[in-house]
Image: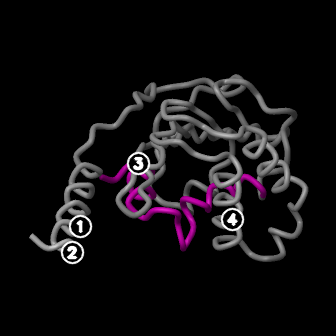
Amino acid sequence: MTMNARLTRFVCMLALMAVHWPAMAAFPSTITVGDTQLQLNGQGIRHRVVFKVYEMALYTQRPVSSAQELIGTPGPTRLSFVALRELPGTDLGLAFIKGMAANSPREAVQRHVASTARLVEVFSGKQRLMPGDHFAMEYLPGKGTLFYIQDVPQGAPVGDAEFFAMVLRIWMGPAPADQQLKNALLGGK
């Protein structure tokens, strides 16, 4: 077998493992944010090439099946994550910023520079997230967006509803981080 054939076979095996490897996270069906009970709207896995990056869950007050419906729904919302591989904090924060910039109007991004900088600071402050580590972002109306790492709040809330809509668009926008993940979060398969 040639070196190219062995390499191709190896890459195919990795791809099959990535598709069939069981998910690590067991997200609860309901959670409480503030004084509001939220339900699991959907969950899925963020893939990058053949690697699983994190598992993610979307919690809402009522079921939503489209990005427009999600972003237009008032009230608390939570995004929960579990790392499925080692993730450098700075890389994760920068990936979130790229996703926001790719899916939000430039004027909105400019209005929320301070909140965006806080998002990068939170994840850059954690050198590495290891497999099994969990983190979250939640929006509380009238307060803003809170960031959590290992269930520990990372400072005071930032931003407003427009900022959290920008965060949601990382996964729900016209250029989502992962289209299959977007579908899964919106209750699809």
Q: Are marks 2 and 1 in contact (CB under 8 Å)?
A: yes
Nearest to the observer: residue 169 or residue 85: 85
Badge 1 element:
helix
139, above or below 1, in the image: above
C-alpha span from label 2 to label 1: 5 Å
C-alpha span from label 2 to label 3: 30 Å
Q: Position of residue 138 (x, y in %)?
A: 68, 39
Q: Amino acid at mark 2?
A: Asn
Badge 3 element:
strand
Could you say which quadrant of the image residue 143 lies in?
top right
Q: Amino acid at mark 3?
A: Ile
Of pointers 4 and 3, the one earlier in the residue sequence: 3
Left or right, residue 47 beside residue 144:
left
Q: Which mark is residue 45?
A: 3
Look at 84% across and 38% down and name the residue there. 157
Left or right, residue 103 beside residue 188:
right
Badge 2 element:
helix
Look at 21% across and 69% down and name the residue there. 8
Q: Position of residue 124 (x, y in %)?
A: 76, 46
Circle 2: is it few (<14), some (14-19), or many (20+) Cα within 10 Å? few
Of pointers 3 and 1, the one earlier in the residue sequence: 1
Q: Which mark is residue 4?
A: 2
C-alpha span from label 4 to label 3: 19 Å
Residue 180: within the magenta? yes
Nearest to the observer: residue 183 or residue 86: 86
Q: Are marks 1 and 4 in contact (CB under 8 Å)?
A: no
C-alpha span from label 3 to label 1: 26 Å
C-alpha span from label 4 to label 2: 38 Å
Q: Are marks 2 and 3 in contact (CB under 8 Å)?
A: no
- Residue identifier under label 4: 100
- Residue identifier under label 1: 7
